[in-house]
Image: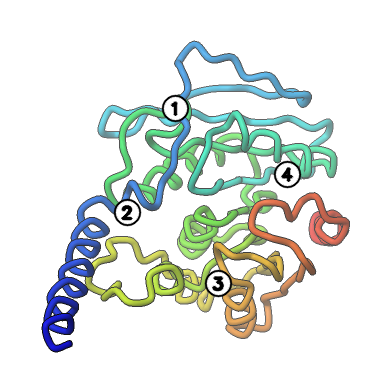
Amino acid sequence: MSKYLLYISIIVPSVLICLGLVIYLYQEHLIFYPEKLSDKHIFKFSESFEEFNIQTPDGEKINVLIFKSENPKGLVYYHHGNAGSLEHWGLKANDFTKRGYDVLIYDYRGFGKSTGKIKNEKMLYKDALLIYKEIEKSYSFDNIIFYGISLGSGIAAKLAHEITPNKLILETPYYNFYDVSKFHYPYLPNSILLHYQFKTNKWISEIKVPIHLIHGTEDETVPYEMSLRLQKIGTNIDLCTIEYGSHNNLNTFEEYQKYLDKVLN
């Protein structure tokens, strides 16, 4: 019996150390799941849109789509999730164009037609800010809404902390990325291993504009209780609860559509 306990005492720590090393060295592969598209790929959407690229200071290009509505009230600056590409995320634009808003959606580095590779959290913020500086050339500062879903909720929150938008909307947001990692990998020393922090809770505590959270009760990727905790941070934070909603289907619920009517109209 003691022999088996000895084996276990050696094997279990070894497995955890190996798993920790994998997460530390290759965590971008565990966080980001990009779909690559050819430069010659042609997007086809029912809404009118324009496509262009923004050059980064280090020589990469960020692929951007702007969906157009008639007589727009403003612009929704949309930060998407950790997987896919604009081929998929562009379908979300209809939720906003039908309510009278133009929508800008972009692909992160290495996603879709965007070049380069995500190497750190700061890089994501710099690219988001670079795109915003292009936006403000064409849209009034007071009519820009920041929207972030899942991974993008942290990017949108950070940008809103630096540049005050008209309002901030976060769909399936996390309290911070450390808490998400603890939820999925509870037995690892995540505070040591994790390069990405995305401190949404810290940033929104200092944002004074209206903040709207949307979360489903059956979310198994980012638990619903994280939005409950975020809501308690400030009186300017409102939470729309989607009963039985999961992580990727909230806009299929009537409650979601009614909430957007309330927030955007």
Q: Nearer the viewer, residue 78 or 55?
A: 78
Q: For the residues carrying marks 2 and 1, which lies nearer the camera in this image? A: 1
Q: Position of residue 263 (x, y in %)?
A: 80, 60
Marked residue nearer the N-terminal end (2 or 1): 1
Q: Nearer the viewer, residue 45 or 191?
A: 191
Q: For the residues carrying marks 4 and 2, which lies nearer the camera in this image? A: 2
Are circles 3 and 1 on residues that touch, CB within 8 Å? Answer: no
The tag on residue 141 is none
Q: Position of residue 107 (x, y in %)?
A: 49, 36
Identify residue for label 3: 207
Identify residue for label 2: 122
Q: Secondary structure at mark 4?
A: strand
Q: Which amino acid is tagged 4?
A: Gly
Q: Nearer the viewer, residue 236 or 115?
A: 115
The answer to whether any part of residue 216 appears in the image is yes
- Give the Cα separation between the discs numbered 2 and 1: 22 Å
Q: For the residues carrying marks 2 and 3, which lies nearer the camera in this image? A: 2
Marked residue nearer the N-terminal end (4 or 1): 1
Identify residue for label 4: 74
- Give the Cα separation between the discs numbered 2 and 3: 20 Å
- Give the Cα separation between the discs numbered 4 and 1: 30 Å
Identify residue for label 1: 36
- Give the Cα separation between the discs numbered 3 and 1: 35 Å
Q: Secondary structure at mark 2?
A: helix
Q: Position of residue 200 (x, y in %)?
A: 48, 69
User: In the displayed structure, would residue 19 be above or below residue 53?
Assistant: below
Q: Position of residue 214 (x, y in %)?
A: 70, 64
